[in-house]
Image: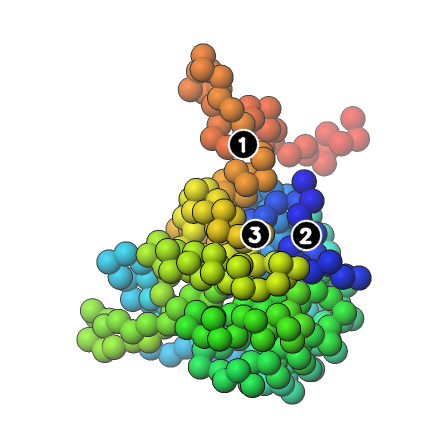
Amino acid sequence: MAIEITRSRKYSLVVSTPVMPAAGAFGFADSYRAMIDYEKLGALVTNPVTIDAWNPAAGTRTVPLDAGLLLHTGLPNPGLRKVIRRYRKTWSNLPIPVILHLAGTSVQHVSQAVNLLDEVDEVAAVELGLSDDLTEGEALALVCAASKLEKPLLVRLPFYECYQLALPAAEAGADALVLTAAPRGTARDAHSGRLVSGRIYGPLIKPMILRLVGRLRREVAAEVPIIGCGGIHSPQDARDYIDAGAIAVQVDTATWAQPKMLERISRDLGGWIATRRKDALLDEWNPDMGHTEALQRRAPAPRANDLGK
């Protein structure tokens, strides 16, 4: 299966399955390699990166909600140059393309990042994250600066400004739109008693973002792919986004709670789900994969002494 998830230009991004982790859910490289078969994913989207190093947020970072989670991280990262040095070799050995998520902090910083990333062959595409409360002019300036890339440019839109920015971002050079970053909210931390602001994650945001995807798919030019992101916790959630008009999906909180769910969703949409024989015994059934593949996974790796025999 080959799915083109960015505009058909000289450099477009083609994946084998329309499922990938969302920025911030998967680290910078192979943190989940022992738990997930990366070959079954469409791409790896890195944690957000900035030109300069950013420290973690101070104070409360996580507030449990009745149907989700409020999270405030501060986007900690060691800075773009260090990220490239640390993970470039690992990226080159991954079986899937790498999409680096660049936090749009300023036009100057985005321009610097473009110059660096165009020289990094291990990065297949860049996802520009637009922060909340940007004016249309500020957002377009960031997209225009990022569009100087020779690589495909995905633009992740903020939730509340999504309608306002989608069409201008597409016209300014976005090769795909990611809808959306998790919405911001405020909740009281039970331990400190303080009100904490952060991003809201959980199943309840899916219906809201799903509506955004359906509406903007009718308004944005058909040549600009839309990638759905938010509240995906099952294969059916992901299929709902595809039915609404998304070409692919990104999964966030499900990856933290059940890492294998990301692979399960990817297998489902990628056509790798095995059908169980009705007379199969329990030990012959492996959810989402064939019995032969399951046995191969369980087989111990050959020892160095055995390789020469």
Label pair 1/2, CB-CB below 8 angstroms: no
Number of other residues with Cα within 10 Å of mark 1, as a class: few under 14, some 14 to 19, many 20 or more? some
Q: Is residue 191 rendered to the left or right of residue 293?
A: left
Q: Quadrant location of the C terminus?
A: top right
Nearer-the-camera pick, 144 or 259: 144
What kind of element bears circle 1?
Answer: loop
Please name the residue that numbered disc 2 is placed on: 4
Q: Secondary structure at mark 2?
A: strand
Q: Which mark is residue 273?
A: 1
Alpha-carbon span between mark 1 and mark 2: 22 Å
Is any atom of residue 281 visible in this view? yes
For mark 3, give the secondary structure. strand
Pointer 2 local density, CA inside 10 Å: few below 14, some 14–19, many at least 20 = some
Q: Earlier in the sequence, mark 3 or mark 2?
A: 2
Please say if 108 is above or below 33. Answer: below
Residue 142 is situated, as x and y percent measured from the top left of the image, at 61, 81
Check the image and name the residue furthest to the top. Answer: 279
Which residue is denoted by mark 3 in the rendering?
A: 248
Residue 99: quarter of image:
bottom right
* Quarter of the image where the N terminus is located: top right
